[in-house]
Amino acid sequence: MHELNMSRAKVYRIENTEDATKVSLPDVIALCQLYSAPAEIREQLLELARAAVRRGWWSSYVSALTGWFVDYVSLEAEATSVFEFEIDAIPGLLQTERYARQVISAWAPDLDPAVLDARVAVRMKRQSRLLEGMALTVVLDEYALSRPIGGPEQMQAQLRHLLDVTTAPNIVLQVLPTAVGAHAALATPYTLLRFPISTPIVYMDTLTGGIYVDEAPDVARYETVAEQLSDRALDVDESRRVVECRLKELE
């Protein structure tokens, strides 16, 4: 099945509901596209897939998470690589615990303290994907390095952490200088998740939820822009020097 990058054997096992076959959320999305499933059927199938993925490590945190973010965590758990373009803050996968707490509490200031603790814990636990070898490429707007989230001391700790974790071979950090000016993703931070056997999916945060883009022509546009952003951003060594300079300014 070239459209899915999935073997015929696996599709056969899925279609015949063999218990030995694990059907992930990305699989369901891709199969719904392939068979042009009606919206109602698609949603029913996705809900069944969501119920299955809630049995992951995050299942004990489901009560503290929104449904759309449970979907995201399950997708990230299946991804082999992630591209992220961020404008205002350090991406969650590269945040310290204290920085993450500031970001999450600012986004939802009325959270119950226990829920806030749970969401911070989930963000920290998600970072284990990087230790498992998931490839992460981040294009970070230079402005994010200057926003003192949590104050100067917390920002210093965050920048030191950023310099430390990005020495890993599976993590690429590129800074997009302010001097670049206009570009294709102005005011459009997004995450592009790639999977071993299904088409990529784009995710974007909003104030009230999350947006998923999974139609191939639309995803292709985001992939093109990701390449353009990487081309226009500083290389890894230059980006590291920018972070180091910002850290010295705060010390």
Image (cartoon, rainbow, N blue to C red):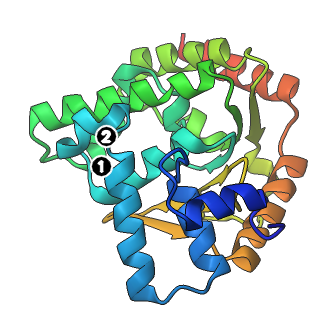
Compared to residue 58, the image places residue 34 above or below, namely below
Which residue is at 61% across, 71% downward?
A: 31
Which of 184/81 is in front?
81
- Amino acid identity at mark 2: Ile
Few, some or many residues within 10 Å of mark 2 (<14, 14–19, 20+): some
Q: Which residue is mark 2?
A: 104
Q: Locate residue 176: give its quadrant.
A: top right
Few, some or many residues within 10 Å of mark 1 (<14, 14–19, 20+): few
In the visual, does 191 lie left or right of 169?
Answer: left
Residue 173, horizontal then vertical, whole percent? 74, 32
What secondary structure is found at the residue carrying circle 2? helix
Quadrant in which the N terminus is drawn: bottom right
Tell whether label 2 touches label 1 (CB within 8 Å): yes
Residue 195, horizontal then vertical, whole percent? 68, 49
- Amino acid identity at mark 1: Trp
In the visual, does 71 lie left or right of 160?
Answer: left
